[in-house]
Amino acid sequence: MQTSSVRALIIHSDIMIIEPYSLLSQNDKIRADANPELLFKIKFQIGYQQLKKFALENDILFDTLQRWLNKANGVPLNLLLKLCKKVNISNDECFKNINYVYVGTKNSRMNFPLKLEINSELFFEGLGLYIGEGVLTEKTNEIALSNTSAQVLQFFLKWLYNCFTIKKKDLNIYIYVPLNNFNKLKVIEKWSNLLNVKEGLIRNVYYHKKSKEEYALIVCNKAVLRYLLNELVRNFLHFTLSNTNLSVAFLRGILAAEGSVYLNPKKNVHHVEIGMKDDEIIGLVGNILNKLGVDYSNKEHDGVFHIIICRKENIQKLIELGGFGSHEKRNILLEKAYDLFKQSQTRRGGALSFYLEKISQNPNVTSRELVKVTNKSLTQIHRILKKLTDKRLVYRKIKTNNTYVYNISEEGIKVIGGDKT
């Protein structure tokens, strides 16, 4: 079991236990609607003079504090905890007497159980997806994510439903299409079926000229959830590296959001690339890859930090780790990259067998003699012979005139013998 510096976040191997109100109390914008009995108890036990002193100590107008306690307006959650502490009311008792919390207007209000039990891997994969693809601007308090993949959007909905008790009625969905002659009713019906939501949740369909594909934007207007996520992000980083399963889950989410697969069959160059503007998160991803034994290179271009993953064994490792998570299309491309690597390796193996056969048929052969029997240039033959020698498939010895001659080794005989059988 691991515990963060904040008591409100405890992580077991497969379950996270979150105390939402404890986390939210770290932000002074969160307001609480509390039971009148609790507010009366606070006023009665503290008394008039001590309330005035409390207001002065916390730089609050006394009239404002009185209005809060008379339930004219919501009390800031962090101040409510301070008031409870003065009269020996525990945090748990305080939280039990909260009807809901909100930010700004009460339209965004949410209530939580004292403890939320969440599947750890689901949470961290969703968090990786949200950090990579979600709307993170400070100008809005919405939780929002857009994508062309219905599977990715389905996973995002599952994350909201199962981790934060969000209901379908709390959502608004918007569809963007690249063609301006779309049939709105058909588009709504299509995405309603893809996302398994009622057509009424799809508020509108818009023409988006710059988009190459149709995509959906899912918006949750619960501002409180945005603040809760901010606190979870602030407290989660060290957990991601401390547990392999959480590292893998977070990586799947990041790959689904910001990963791409590039294929070049002609040059046999295939790689996975992750690009992000947040250098702290890209650094975390790099540390996760190091921990999981995946080699990579990195570069920075125009303020975007890139991680590039090449080579067959690294692609194979990504597949074993779950690849791009919920992004089915990219998982298919990842499998294709691996298959292309295998095909290329088979071709290269066949080529090596060809040269081994020639050396086997011509004992004590020189490089110039191999040029004649293979129709390759001398430079190419020297490169091939070096590779075969390095692999100990052939060995060389010097003739009296300082010319090297080559013969097949026992390892080389096994290679061509294996090919013939």
Image (cartoon, rainbow, N blue to C red):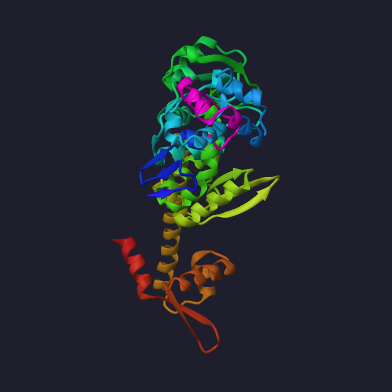
For the residue pair 336 and 163, the one nearer the viewer reads as 163
> Does residue 414 appear in this view?
yes
Residue 221 place in picture, x, y as percent: 55, 22
Q: Where, by quadrant of the figure, is residue 63 drawn?
A: top right
Q: Residue at x 53, y 37 (%)?
A: 257
Q: Where, by quadrant of the figure, is residue 55 drawn?
A: top right
Q: Where, by quadrant of the figure, is residue 56 drawn?
A: top right
> Does residue 144 appear in this view?
no
Q: Is residue 67 above or below residue 287?
A: above
Quarter of the image with the C terminus is: bottom left
Residue 144 place in picture, x, y as percent: 55, 27
Residue 388 place in picture, x, y as percent: 46, 70
Q: Residue at x 61, y 26 (%)?
A: 65
Q: Residue at x 58, y 51 (%)?
A: 283
For the residue pair 216 and 383, the one nearer the viewer reads as 216
**Segment colored magenta:** 24-51
For the residue pair 110 and 243, the one nearer the viewer reads as 110
Q: On the picture, is 64 further left or further right than 239?
A: right
* Residue 32 belongs to magenta span: yes
For the residue pair 387 and 290, the one nearer the viewer reads as 290
Residue farthest to the right, as pictured: 302
Q: On the picture, is 409 further left or further right than 303?
A: left
Residue farthest to the left, as pictured: 421
Residue 12 place in picture, x, y as percent: 37, 46
* Residue 413 belongs to magenta span: no
Q: Is residue 356 above or below residue 34?
A: below
Q: Is residue 359 above or below residue 295?
A: below
Q: Residue at x 62, y 48 (%)?
A: 279
| Total marks placed | 0
